[in-house]
Image (cartoon, rainbow, N blue to C red):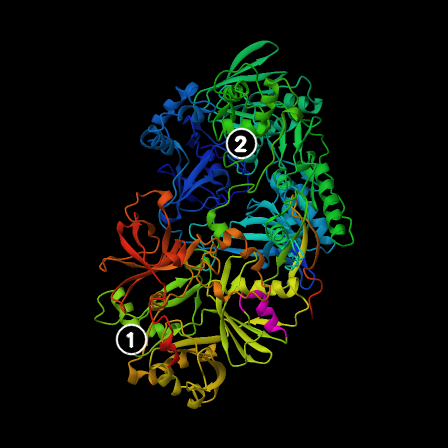
Amino acid sequence: MSRLSSGGFIDRSRIVKFSFDGKSYSGHPGDTLASALIANDVKLVGRSFKYHRPRGILTAGSEEPNALVSLRKGARHEPNTRATMVELFDGLEAFPQNVTPSLSFDVMAVNQLISRFIGAGFYYKTFMWPASFWEKLYEPIVRGSAGLGTTPNVPDPDHYEKASAFCDVLVIGAGPTGLMAALTAARSGARVILADEDYLIGGRLNSEKVTIGDRDGAQFSAAVAAELVAMPNVKVMSRTTVFGVYDDSYGAVERVSDHLAVPAPYQPRQRLWRIAAKHTVLAAGAIDRPIVFDGNDRPGIMLAQGVQTYINRFAAAPARRMAFFTSSDGAWVAAFDAADAGVEIAAIVDARRTVADRLLAEARRRNIRTLLGGAVTAAHGSPLKSVDVVADGKRERLAVDGLAMSGGYSPNVQLACHHRGRPQWHPEIGALLATDPPPRMKLAGAANGSYALSACLADGAAQGAEAAVAAGFAAKTVALPRCQDDPVEVQAYWHVKDTAHFAFVDFQTDVSVKDIEIAAKEGFIPVEHLKRYTALGMGADQGKLSNFNGLAIMADITGRSIPEAGTTIYRPPYTPVSMGALTGHHRAKDFRPTRLTPTHFWAKRLGAKFVETGMWLRAQYFPRPGDKDWLATVQREVTAVRSSVGMIDVSTFGKIDLQGPDVGKLLDRVYVNTYSTLPVGKARYGVMLREDGMVMDDGTTAHLSDDHWVMTTTTVNAVKVFSHLEFCLQVLWPDLDVRMASISEQWAQIALAGPNARKVLEKIVDDPAAVANEALPVMGAKEAKLMGGIAGRVFRLSFSGELGFEVAVPARHGEKLAEAMMAAGKEFGITPYGTEALAMMRIEKGHVSGPELNGQTTVADLGLGKMASKKKDYIGRVLFERPDLTDENRLGYVGIVPVDKRNVLRAGTHLMPLGAAVAVANDHGFVSSATQSPTFGHAVGVGFLAGGAKRIGEKMRAYDPLRGGDFEVEICSPYFYDPQGERTRV
Amino acid sequence: MLIPCPYCGARDSHEFTYRGAAVGPRPDPARPDAADAFHDYVYLRDNPAGDNAEYWYHGAGCRSWLKVVRDTTTHEIKSVTGAGGEVKP
Ligand SMILES: [Zn+2]
């Protein structure tokens, strides 16, 4: 056991059992999976992506590139979690990834031996030819070896939710800087959100041994956090990662239940936050950079900050005998903490020739050997057994089971680059800083290159005050507590020259120095090319640890400075975000709302089958016992309508109420035909164009009284037409005096169709004389009292080709109306029908619908050219008259029937000349809608054919390769049923 | 992205529908070169990297059509007005 006997923020009074790779271990509350593994002496936690090299835990933070593990079994299985961010809970099961077959023995590790063949550009070079090899050979290999972890193949049982938050000052990061920023802003009265990815507030204060005022760092952070939590204007969000900076908002994910085996009742697994902040302080800290040398990825090698965290926060010693390899002061302090915790320190190897006397004295006091101007040139063993060091020209091998490294700090500037601000090189601290952050964001503390604790506290307080003032609050000065003021000297140091093959730059994507050399040699030198050619920084960690080293090494190779080599920007997310959190509740049937018609439950009681049409759920057909199949049902419904009477809910059509003296003028300008002459009490069918001359929508509009009209649109275009009319009224013709409201939801509308339709209607309206043939002629429209005083509307419209009426009542009476029609129609065998019968009858009748109004058809293409007025302007007129849109050989609207009446015609079938070969050049048109007509006893279809109506009578080849149709058809008029419309006039 | 609707205040862009560049006015259909004028009106767009005047519809709000000047490289909103002048109260 490597658990230290005292210290750390773990609850030693309780034991937490967990397993890793099938073996059982125990830890304590407060542990991460990584700290518990270290405390249990587990060094090997995974295999690398490309070479399957054994890897251990490198860090103690969210930047961890190696220790990617899968958690849990079954539906809650979750791949690619970072062991360093996983809070230990009782019963946690964790599994290593990328191991075939096992963690300790991996056959794919043979990739290391062929590594010189699978270096940079391997995929681009290897899988080029022959093309026939791709499907059978290359793709299975690539698929088999690509990716990490596996996804569960059953639905996630947990739920995820979305929430919004608003604040004056958002502080990202709750380390010393962020705590001071939040405290200062909060005391000024500003609404503050303090977010931190950790579950313990304090950041590095929990990892380093410091004194602030009269308290240690952890006590200080706990006290500040307690004060903040108690303030009503502050929201402290732990376990919350701010992952993206968007326009006027931040994206954050709160891991509400990730630290539990199963979320508490009614609690989400995770919560996605949109945070709108007036001003932001980014206090995300800085992380150690690895140093590139041979074998720098071996298990047992860690970043110095990580070693310090495991020892101080988790009381877990990563090794018994360690060397430290560094170019910054921070690693020295980490070494002292390790030594004080009982770890034997073999040496501190510092690449710098001079180091502060203070540090040398502290080392001497602990009898720690120091090698200045030195380097670690190689590491051996897996897990680590020894390292080769060189100093003053002398080489030696140190037996160690742990090595801590730090080549300087990388400030966490990622979020500051999400608006494309490019980080700039600052040689004085050897790091890239964000000089062009997003609007109203300031960086503070280590994230801005200030590493000394006193500087962090001061910077945090200053930026917190500035943000509060900018948000309109009077700043309150917060006394800065006394604390260490030691400068933190840093020299950027990234590469031990002349190291051998396996000197890794990017641990997650297995990019080595060799790969960068290959990229340089082959011309992939600009940093964006380098990334894509080698995969540098393309892992889930976005190169937090590797990008700087990679571009610095490329700069060295090409003899340029770091600014000349160029830097990369970052994109959201800062750390990986689960798809569940991004999806929230919008999954399966909750993806979008389901709209129910006013008669939905009535139809359901009658056993209707429903179909989704846009968001609507509509009755598709009403099966009855004895119906052979759905087609028999639909044909029965059609026959019932044509022989007696049927009814269908048509409430889903868009309905727009138009009022004002200029409605007629507006309609004249948006429809191709004329409305201003339409008398009160009548309705008219109209076609509406887009300004480019194509048909946008069709429907009927009724003139109810002088200034009052009601328009119907197709179901799918209801919203589009409404906003189009708003555009016309507000932008094109603001002088028109028209008011409009959508009444689609407010009115239920049911169509009655069939020779007995009027007999049914007469029993529903309070005054039967009002719906007599003369009182309500074809296309008549009037307001009427129904079912004993309910104010409704009656329109004499027909989509079926039979005598037809549409009855509208306020939506709350929709079901009552349906019941009343059923009762009134009982003696006539009234038959409810659905969308299938509706479509079947409109094809028999030749009415155009969705498949014909496909956005590529003009009013002339649809056979409705005569409707277009020549006497007035309307939207789309000018461009509709373009030569190509009026060409007589355009695809025009026709009817199609099979010559052999047994053939089934299908929409999508292509029309070719008889005997012509199947070729695009011979494709003359297509069937847009077709149905098995019970009225005619065979298939009928409508569609579009080059030349249109002038080819009526021609025989053609109907070719449908998808469903195996190939037979002869005859082109005819599309108006199959009662072309003179006599049946509607009785 | 927040759009400061002149009638509703700053509202989330989810409440709005984007139409495209704020071209116009609609050409006079009676002019002799109407076909060319409408062609340009319907099809020609500048696609600037920078300030762009656009139509946005506040469909989930006050239903106003707005003319929004937006920097296409930063999404900064420079100005918002009623697209056809003032909307009648
Ligand atoms: Zn508005």
Would residue A335 appear left or right of A636 to someone viewing this image?
right
Element carrying mark 1: helix
> Which one is in front, A863 or A939?
A863
What residue is shown at x 48% (from left), y 82% (from top)? A792
Quadrant location of residue A629? bottom left
Residue A183: percent from left, percent from top: 70, 49
Residue pointed to by mark 1? A640
Q: Specify the segment rendered in magenta.
A: A662-673
Task: Determine if the C-beta at disc 1 is less than 8 A from ligand 1.
Answer: no
**Does label 2 or label 1 sit earlier along the sequence?**
2
Relative to A115, does residue A152 appear above or below in the rendering? below
Residue at the top extreme of this rendering: A393
Q: Which residue is mark 2?
A: A537
List x then y, in percent, for residue B17. Answer: 58, 57
**Crowding at label 1, few (<14), some or many (≥20) Cα neighbours within 10 Å?**
many
Name the amino acid, label 2: Gly
Which callout, 2 or 1, points to the residue nearer the camera? 1
Q: Is residue A499 above or below residue A32?
A: above
Q: Position of residue A481 (x, y in %)?
A: 73, 42
Q: Residue at x 41, y 81 (%)?
A: A817
Q: Secondary structure at mark 2?
A: loop
> How far is the residue under mark 2 from the one under mark 1?
68 Å
Q: Nearer the viewer, residue A83 or A120?
A: A120
